[in-house]
């Protein structure tokens, strides 16, 4: 079954940050179903649901991704809580990475005045980290996990692009 990985991965379109996603996460999983072992498919399915990540923490790439993501969120909590003058300890998670670059990513994001540009900066940093995690993994489960996570980032931005900005503005203005 492992021989299907090169075929599957080479048949997937390249993903580029800021581009339209080529298909939905569900279509991606459907493409993978039957071409990879069931246990690998289960891990890949968990990648599509952040709430289930803790269940597959034994997979090394996903473990490294979770540590990065939690560490980055912890740094954002520290920065935002200091601005609001509240104690961050109760909002921090212990299982995050303590990589010092995360502080710099969070601080540089915080310095960007536009919220959308700040979020884009964070997602570009996430994308870069996924590229690092994928290095050396070209035709295996790790490559598919990184692909699935990148696809989630693209879909997040596709939702932002599709939102009716005028409707949102009217809704916000009607609250006051």
Image (cartoon, rainbow, N blue to C red):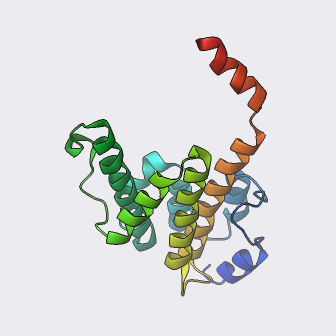
Question: Up-down: is 156 above or below 21?
Answer: above
Q: Examine the image and state in which quarter residue 56 appears.
A: bottom left
Asked if residue 57 can be seen in this view, the reply is no
Q: Nearer the viewer, residue 23 or 150?
A: 150
Residue 160, above or below 139: above
Residue 84 point in image, percent of width and height = 31, 36
The extreme bottom residue here reads 136
Q: Nearer the viewer, residue 26 or 109?
A: 109
What is the quadrant of the C terminus in the image? Answer: top right
- The reply, left or right, for residue 128 in relation to residue 13 is left
Image coords of residue 38 (percent x, y) = 55, 64
Residue 149, above or below 164: below
Taking the spot 33% from the left edge, 42% from the top edge, the residue there is 83
Q: Is residue 158 left or right of residue 150?
A: right
Provide residue 144's location: percent of width, then percent of height: 60, 70
Q: Quadrant of residue 37?
A: bottom right
- Residue 109: in sight, yes or no? yes
Q: Is residue 137 above or below residue 42?
A: below
What residue is drawn where x is 62% and y is 78%? Answer: 1
Q: Going 24% across and 43% down the picture, which residue do you hit?
A: 88
């Amino acid at each position: 079954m492992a021989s299907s990985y090169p075929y599957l991965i080479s048949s997937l379109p390249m993903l580029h940050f800021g581009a339209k996603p080529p298909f939905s996460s569900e279509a991606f999983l459907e493409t993978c179903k039957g071409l990879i072992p069931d246990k690998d498919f289960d891990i890949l399915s968990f990648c599509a649901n952040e709430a289930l990540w803790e269940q597959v923490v034994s997979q090394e790439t996903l473990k490294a991704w979770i540590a990065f993501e939690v560490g980055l969120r912890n740094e954002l909590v520290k920065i935002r809580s200091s601005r609001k003058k509240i104690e961050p300890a109760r909002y921090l998670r212990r299982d995050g990475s303590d990589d010092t670059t995360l502080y710099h990513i969070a601080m540089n994001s915080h310095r960007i005045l536009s919220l959308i540009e700040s979020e884009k900066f964070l997602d570009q940093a996430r994308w870069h980290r996924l590229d690092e995690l994928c290095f050396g993994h070209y035709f295996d489960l790790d490559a598919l996990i990184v692909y699935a996570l990148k696809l989630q980032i693209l879909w997040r931005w596709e939702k932002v692009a599709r939102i009716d900005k005028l409707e949102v503005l009217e809704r916000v203005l009607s609250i006051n």
